[in-house]
Image (spheres, grey):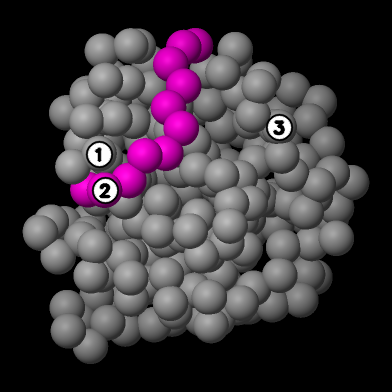
Amino acid sequence: MKLVWSPETASKAYIDTVKSCEAFQDSSVAELVSAMAAGWNAKLIVETWSQGGAIATSIGLAVASLHTGGRHVCVVPDEESASEYAEAMGKAGMSPEVVAGEPEEVMEGLVGVDFLVVDCRRGDFARVLRAAKLGQRGAVLACKNASARGTADFRWRSVVEGGGSRRRLVRSVFLPVEKGLDIAHVAAAGGSSTGKEKGRWVKHVDRQSGEEYVIRK
């Protein structure tokens, strides 16, 4: 089985996220990842967060999980971050699962990830990507605040396929949304990275903000 795109579900999640994030000035990434997670019908949605981070993306992913009937889990570095995150999400009327700990240990218990969003402002974001136990249908991986990587050498293929992993990179795209959003589509175990998968990336322009989004259809 492969991830199958549903434009209708993506549209509904996008609209609901726009409504839920009206109070946040920077919510473009939240709306985009929400639509993508819902459109791919992600059943296990995982994100990373640390103290002081924006909460809009988390709200968007929570909205997506409601549309897919899936599970939304947030990985934080410590209990203090967990408390702050839970409080912020509670004010938004949402209560996703929160797990604190080292990336390798936490991700070991999250098997079958369909959609993963990491924050590049966390120094361990690459470790989270490598440790993720992706689903048999493949997965979509996203790095928000990608500009925070600075001049560090980052290559999707080395993260996705390194260390003898059977995961295969299908394609990736960088979007200049907010502080940068880097997205990769990873094939299921044993899948091909030749780019011959059916589907294509399409550009969408938000009529209100004028921002451009690219979504695989």
Q: Position of residue 74 (x, y in %)?
A: 43, 33
Q: CA distance from mark 1 to mark 2?
A: 5 Å
Q: Residue under circle 3?
A: 111
- Residue for point 81% across, 26% down: 164
Residue 33 visible here = no
Image marks 1 and 2: residues in contact by CB distance under 8 Å: yes
Image quadrant of residue 178? Answer: bottom left
Task: Tell me if residue 96 is in the magenta stretch.
Answer: yes
Q: Residue under circle 2?
A: 93
Q: Residues within 10 Å of mark 3 (few under 14, many from 20)?
A: few
Q: CA distance from mark 3 to mark 1?
A: 26 Å
**Mark 3 or mark 1, whichever is nearer to me:** 1
Q: Position of residue 28 (x, y in %)?
A: 26, 63
Q: Which residues are magenta?
A: 92-102
Residue 68 visible here = yes
Image marks 3 and 2: residues in contact by CB distance under 8 Å: no
Q: Is 124 left, or right, of 198 in this rendering?
A: left
Q: Amino acid at mark 2?
A: Gly
Q: Residue under circle 1?
A: 90
Image marks 3 and 1: residues in contact by CB distance under 8 Å: no
Is the residue 153 above or below the residue 106 in the image?
Answer: below
Q: Amino acid at mark 3?
A: Val
Q: CA distance from mark 3 to mark 2?
A: 27 Å
Quadrant location of the C terminus in the rendered image: bottom right
Viewer-nearest residue: 24 or 149? 24
Is the residue 98 above or below the residue 37 in the image?
Answer: above
Q: Amino acid at mark 1?
A: Gly
Q: Is 92 left, or right, of 130 in this rendering?
A: left
Task: Tell me if residue 165 is in the magenta stretch.
Answer: no
- Residue for point 71% across, 39% down: 112
